[in-house]
Image (spheres, rainbow, N blue to C red):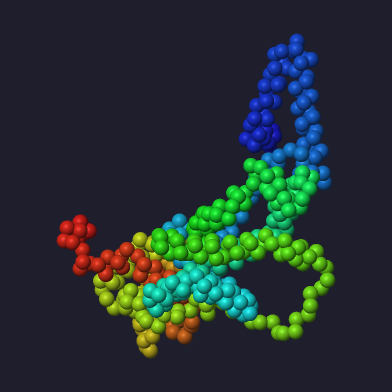
Amino acid sequence: TPRHLDRLRELGRQYPVFCFLLLVLLLSTLLLNRYIHIIMVFWSFLAGVVTFYCSLGPESLLPNILVSIKPKTKSYQQELFPLGHSCAVCGKIKCKRHRPTLLLENYQPWLDLKVPSKVDASLSEILELVLENFVYPWYRDITDDEAFVDELRVTLRFFAAVLVRRTQKVNVASLITQKLLKVSMKHIEIISKARQKVKNTECLQQAALEEYGPDLHVALRSRRDELLYLRKLTEMLFPYILPPKATDCRSLTLLIREVLAGSVFLPSMDYLADPDTVNHLILIFIDNSPPEEATEPTSTLVPFLQKYSDTRNKKPSVLKLELKEIREQQDLLFRFMNFLKQEGAVHVLQFCLAVEEFNDRILCPELSDSEKMMLHEEVKKIYETYCLDESVDKIQFDPFIVEEIRNIAEGPYAEVVKLQTMRCLFEAYEHVLSLLENVFTPMFCHSDEYFRQLLRGAESPARNSKMSR
């Protein structure tokens, strides 16, 4: 029947090698019937495989001894830099239009990350001690300007936020059972073998290192090798723990590498390798006694390291721009729009301009029917252009904002006057304006377009003509 043919066709598509072998065996049985006693060996093997698969299949309570054919379903999840896919502009998964630097959790990983105020204060104190001990002693001899240290604080906040978010995703149970226990058992085995070879406990450490042989980690060879390993490891972590394009600054990456490798990671490894620390952690894990009752109230949740990263520099930067200044100067606005085109986000600025023009017209106290119809058409255009999921210029808004704009766009034109008192369009405008001020304007101040604007008078005529062409 056609139904059985479809099943056979699907079976052949799923298991082509198996079906090919089965067909070969059938043909060989028909054509080489004189060697049936030899062919029966292969048929017996095939029957045994099928029997084992059916008896120990994935639906059985017994473990499946064969590799499962079913493919694992991969669920999309919003990951952190550099694997993030929740676009800051359109909010789509795996956005292909906007550049990866527009992933908002990649640019500001501390968003929606809150910790108890006491934890935040303690962490701020630790990071401040790092700056006091390893940055300020030589930096104060150069200048008293805090601008560079402010940038360093933001970078340390970025690193700490990424570390916290990635730590939250770690499966502690699988980490302990699949990695730590294996390493611990191997270490205990090495120590027991080394103990049998030496009589004096003072030589036990060297005997254990020799027992490891070629499996000895490179960082255990010497203190210098350990520091070099941590430096290389820190450099490999830069694409994950530093802001986008921060690795382009060689001086900043070298400074952060030395601070992290020599002042953070190396002392941390020494502390964790201390036997007293290891024994104390083991006692904490195996202790079943309930913790002491808290005598103080629970501290409030605060944004992660917000106070620590506040600007200390009182002098305004000559290179910093505000969105208002950009819009007041035509040449800067032209450069800013070119920058947004390169980032694939010029429609963000167009939305602001369209809403400003719409608000100027709808706030008129007396509107005629023709004006209401025109304003209603503009609302429909704004909704279809910036709110629909299938639109290429979609901007991510809160669902209630999209719902209220949709109700006005799909309702009668006379209800457009409700937007005079409704908050949906104003909140959408504030959201996009915040995106322009907090994300795109700082990026523009670090872009080639802005520096071309600053150096336009210092460029040679030949270069100017080349750029014009």
| Residue 98 horizontal/vertical position (percent) | 43, 60
Q: Identify the residue shown where x is 58% and y is 62%.
A: 265
Q: Residue at x 62, y 61 (%)?
A: 269
Q: Nearer the viewer, residue 170 or 349?
A: 170
Q: Is residue 310 above or below residue 343?
A: below
Is 466 placed left or right of 24 in the picture? left
Which residue in the rendered view is the most extreme toward the bottom? 365
Residue at point 42%, 66% (across, down): 385
User: Looking at the figure, which quarter contains the N terminus?
Assistant: top right
* Left or right relative to 359: residue 171: right
When asked about the image quadrant of residue 436, the answer is bottom left
User: Is 397 situated left or right of 219 in this image?
Assistant: left
Residue 251 horizontal/vertical position (percent): 41, 63
| Nearer to me, 82 or 398 | 82
Inspect this view and state whether residue 323 appears. no
Tell me residue 329's x, y (percent).
27, 76
- Image spot of residue 126 (x, y percent): 58, 74
Q: Give the quarter of the image for residue 469.
A: bottom left
Vertical placement of residue 213 versus 371, above or below: above
